[in-house]
Each structure stands twice: as structure tokens, then as C-alpha cells.
Image (cartoon, grey):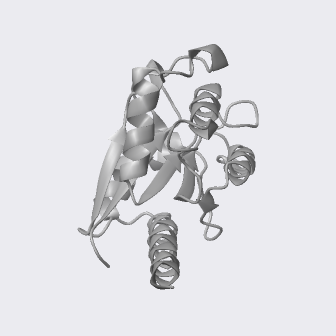
Amino acid sequence: MSDLTILALSGSLRKDSLNTRLLSSVARIAPPELTFDVFGELAEIPLFNEDAEHPSPPAVADLRRRIRAADGVLIATPEYNAAMPGVLKNALDWLSRPAAEGPALTRKPVAIIGASQGPLGTIRAQLNLRQVLHKMNATVVGQPEFVLPHAHQALGEGELPAGSPSLPILTGVLQGLVELIEHDRAVASVLAAR
């Protein structure tokens, strides 16, 4: 595996977000070839407004630039009212728009994870997020799926502990993202050679 950059995005604005802590756990278990660019400015993205598209607001332009520079994207979503949070959907609405370079997530490898205090984890939010990413023509890791129910207990005061039974699944999601990136690179190489 060559060195890869992953844009990591938490769909929560909370200072002590369970999903932001989950992203920290991923960075801890990742192989050294992976670099994580954590986008922490979700709160700075204004509500989507077509009248404000050109030029893009600075936080939107920054997110687009960082996604384009990344090899893949990892999204950690909470679940609010059986769906992804509005702030995450708002960011995706901005990213779906045809800026000068086109929509930012088109054919971009993406993996989804999520943590919640509830017993179902983020199953419904992830389904909702998958629908939106599918419509945006992103390439999403199908299996394994990672949901962390009762995350306030599983994460304790920090990240997932070293012996957590959730870590192999989380590692599998990360490996799935790397494989998707490498597959896309191989296909692009073949097409470029024609």
C-alpha cells in the first residue's frame, strides 16, 4: 500500500462528540501509510443557498479542496431522529453542487462509521447517508458496516480501548476503504493507458 490521505469528517458539532472520538480511534489503529486530514470546521459551513454558490463560502471551498486532495473520505455520523444530522446533510448539499471542478464526491471512495448512545447505533442514519452518497455518485464501502451502540460506555472517557471487540470491524472498514481506493487507482491506470 502506498501512502494515502483520508479526509475524516465527523457529522457532529458537539465539543465532546462520540463520533469525533471514534475518528480518533480509527487514526490510532490505522497503518502508518494512512494520513488523516480531520475537517473540524463543519460549524462554519452556512446553510445551503443557491444564491450564495458563486463564489463558494470559504469553509465550503476549503472542504471541497481538501476532499479533492484526499484519496478517500471517512464519515462518522451520529443519528438524530432516525437520520443523519442536518449539519452533515447541509455539507453534502454544498458538495453535490457543480462548482467549477464538478461535484466533490463524484467517484470518490467513501467509508461510513457511526456512534450513538442508543441501542441501534447509527443504523438508520447510515442508511440515510448511503442514499445521499449514492445519489452523489460517490463510491461507498459496502461491507463491513460499523455501528457503535451505547458508545458513551464503549468509548468511556476517550477512544475505543485496545481490547475492544469493535476494533476488528473498524479495521475491516478501513481496509475496505483502502481496497476501494487502490481498485479505483488501478482502473484509472488501465483507462489512462488506452
Name the foreground residue: 7 vs 158: 7
Residue 2: image location, x then y, percent: 29, 75
Residue 88 image-quadrant placement: top right
Q: For residue 156, say whether it is visible.
A: no
Residue 8 falls left or right of residue 51: left
**Quadrant that contains the N terminus:** bottom left
Point 63% across, 14% down: residue: 51
Residue 168 falls left or right of residue 49: left
- Whether 135 is drawn above or below 18: the answer is below
- Whether 38 is drawn above or below 85: the answer is below
Residue located farthest toward the left when viewing the structure as drawn? 32
Residue 85: image location, x then y, percent: 64, 31
Point 42% across, 36% down: residue: 63
- Whether 64 is drawn above or below 56: the answer is below
Q: For residue 93, say whether it is visible.
A: yes
Point 49% across, 84% down: residue: 190
- Whether 167 is drawn above or below 191: the answer is above
Residue 148 falls left or right of residue 127: left
Residue 134 image-quadrant placement: bottom right
Point 60% across, 66% down: residue: 141
